[in-house]
Image (spheres, rainbow, N blue to C red):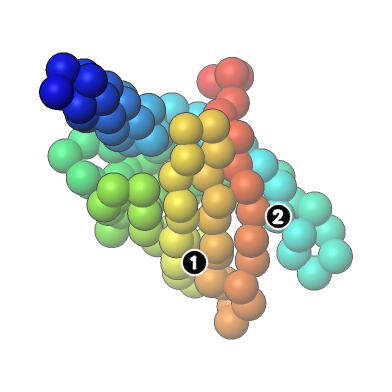
Amino acid sequence: MNTKIFNSLVLVVCGILFCFIVADTNGKWSGNVDYNGSMVPLSYFFKVENGKVTGTSQTPLGIADIVDGKIEKDIMTFKVNINGETAMHTATVFADSINMKISYHGDQLYTTLKRSNSQ
C-alpha cells in the first residue's frame, strides 16, 4: 500500500516538474531554416505570460514583432510580418528545443530552435 502511494506521489511530482521545464520558453532561441537552398539564420526572443506569447523575431530582413501569439501545453502559435506578408508559425516546445513550422509565401519551412546564450 505504501509503495503505491509513494509511486503515485513521485509521478505527480515528475509531471509537475515536466510542465515547468516544457513551459519555460522565455528568452532567446536561435536556429537556421532552408529557404530556396540557402540557410537563413533565425532568432526569436519570446515572452510568455498567462498563455500569451509576445516578443520579436530577427532575420537578415530585420526585426519584427510577434503577434497573435498563444501557447497551450506544448503547442505555440504566432504570426510575424515579413516584408508586408504574414508568416504563420506553429511550434512544439520541448525542454531543450523548439520544433517549428513556418508557413510563408505558400511554402512550409521547418526548423529546430535551440536556446541561445547570447542576448
Q: Which amino acid does label 1 sit on?
A: Ala
* Left or right: residue 12 compared with residue 42: left
Q: Picture coordinates of residue 66 (x, y %)? A: 38, 50
Secondary structure at badge 2 equals strand
Q: Is residue 62 visible to us here?
A: no
Pointer 2: residues within 10 angstroms few (<14), some, or many (20+)? some
What residue appears at the point 64 percent right and 66 percent down from the top-left corner? 109
Name the N-terminal-most of marks 2 and 1.
2
Alpha-carbon span between mark 2 and mark 1: 14 Å
What residue appears at the point 45 percent right and 66 percent down from the top-left corner? 88
Residue topped by disc 1: 87
What residue appears at the point 46 percent right and 55 percent down from the top-left corner? 91
- Quadrant (top left, top right, bottom left, bottom right) of the C terminus: top right
Q: What residue type is labelled 2?
A: Val
Instruction: Depth check: give the residue in front, 22 or 109.
Output: 22
Pointer 1: residues within 10 angstroms few (<14), some, or many (20+)? some
Secondary structure at badge 1 equals strand
Residue topped by disc 2: 33
Q: Picture coordinates of residue 40 (x, y %)? A: 74, 51
Residue 6 bears which disc, if any? none
